[in-house]
Image (spheres, grey):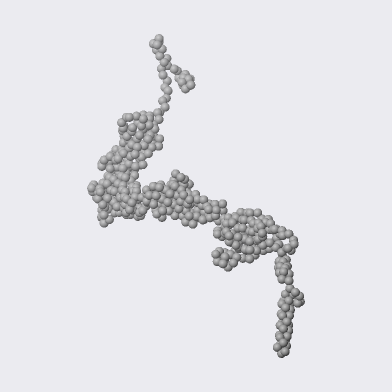
Amino acid sequence: MELRRLSIYLALFVLVCVSQCTEARSTKYSGEGEDVNYDDVLADEASDDEAQNDADGGNDADEDVEDAIMLTQATNYSVAIGRNVRLECRVSPADGVVVQWTRNNTKYFIGTLKRTEQDLKTYTGQDRFFIAANSTDLLIKDVQPSDSGTYRCEILQMNPPSVEHNIVITESPKVIRFYASDSGRVPEGSDLLLTCEASGSPPPQILWSWDGDNGNHRLTEKDGEFTANSVFIRNVKRQNAGKYYCYVFNTVGNDQAELAVNVLRKPRVHVHRTVVNSDLNVEAVLECSIHDEPASHIRWYKDGRLIEDSSRQYSVSTNGQHSNLTVIPSSDMDFGTFTCEAENNLGKHNRSIELVQRPVVEDFMSEGTKLSWTVHSHQPIEAMELQLRDVNGDEDWRTVSVPVPAGGARRGLPVSFELEAADVGAGKYEVAVKVRNSKGWSQHADPALVDIEAQPEYIRPASVYLPSSAYSIRPSLALLPLIYVLVRF
């Protein structure tokens, strides 16, 4: 009996517990103790999501969704470095549309949201990129060369329309470096390479010019071989020395640079006079100058023997590339051949000067039939001669004596002489002059050309003889004017 009563109590307890648990679960989903339909719960959650989307600007599920369209056309932008550029991305409708800006698959903005911190580590200058206020345009400030390229604006939707803009960065050209092989000091006979490195956008074109002995002119294919930014000149000669110019230009501006090129060669000796007149105890100065680089060492020789710097008989004065040798002859042995020699690491060269006591003729020239020259002689002049030869014939030289002017023993005596047809006849002549003193005849001066015209002949009255008459008829004085007029006619 007691066992039966205990079983009844246990069954009632279990029934109460099951009833309370069912009420609690029903309250969690509905809050009102009603039976729960799980399909209805999922449907309600979906409705909540749609309501949320509507709150965010979406459309009702029952309405048709209208895709946004792109209004902007693709554009090429040409922008100078340091300027700002705004890339347009105009869409319709303007509200509730999200666009994404990319370049080379790199995202710049989605809407107004900048790239992630990881993106920022791989691209510098993010602080120069912005979404323009109240728009979906991309604004780039302080444009740099690396900003050139293609930018894409895309509407984020099922069928995403897009537009691509291309940015070309323009920069005024600038010569970065202009240089030559061997630093512009090129040995004669070697090759010369000129290189001009320049920057700019669009890439600049290059023109070359050279400022030589005949002025500035543009270099062409006959002057050298051209590549993108260099010119190659083979077998350089002395004439290739001078200033070279590199001109760079594009659609934005231009720039230029210049470079001096020196052609190194063995020295060239120039003497002011090849023959110098002097006399015993009379000072004579022999001069020579050296041309071309590099600088040369200058030496003087007397009849092939080196003149030492310590020699008392001679005085050498050298200033840069010019050298003078001063000689005061004390005997006839002190006259002879003096040689100026220059030497550098590319070779040597020399020229000789004759120091003589016989006369020296300089500056021989002609002006019409008038001849003039200068005589240097410390000895009295004894004779002067002209030698002539017809340039159109094979005749030998003829000699015409020239009077010796008074006071002929001096340095720098000017002489002039008129050559007349009466002396040699009409024609074109090659004429030379020589002068003699007690030490001998001078060397011939360089010949001059003289054109002597024939002199006009005057008509004289002539006698008229009659063959059948024993006398002649002579014109009277009254008829002379008439005869002259008829003859002239």
Q: Where does the image place residue 41, in percent across and percent down from the top left?
A: 72, 71
Which residue is at a point 39% across and 12% down the rendered structure image? Answer: 471
The answer to which quarter of the image holds residue 319 is bottom left
Q: Is residue 225 left or right of residue 86?
A: left
* 367 left or right, relative to 32: left
Q: Quadrant of residue 93?
A: bottom right
When the figure is inspected, residue 182 is found, relative to residue 47, above or below; the finding is above
Give the x, y percent position of residue 223. 44, 46
* Left or right of residue 56: residue 241: left
Q: Residue furthest bottom?
A: 2
Q: Residue at x 31, y 52 (%)?
A: 343
Q: Which is more toward the observer, 78 or 212?
A: 78
Quarter of the image that includes the N terminus? bottom right
Residue 261 position (above or below residue 130) = above
Q: Nearer the viewer, residue 111 or 485?
A: 111
Residue nearest the observer in this picture, 73 or 212: 73
Instruction: Count how many numbered circles sit on residues in the image.
Output: 0
Q: Is residue 39 left or right of residue 370?
A: right
User: Can residue 404 be seen here?
Assistant: no
Residue at the spot 47% in from the left edge and 52% down from the top edge: 229
Residue 40 horizontal/vertical position (percent): 73, 69
Spot the residue most to the top: 468
Which x, y percent locates residue 321?
35, 53
Which image quarter: residue 146? Answer: bottom right
Does any portion of residue 176 appear in the rendered image?
Answer: yes
Give the residue displayed 60% in from the left and 55% down from the top: 166
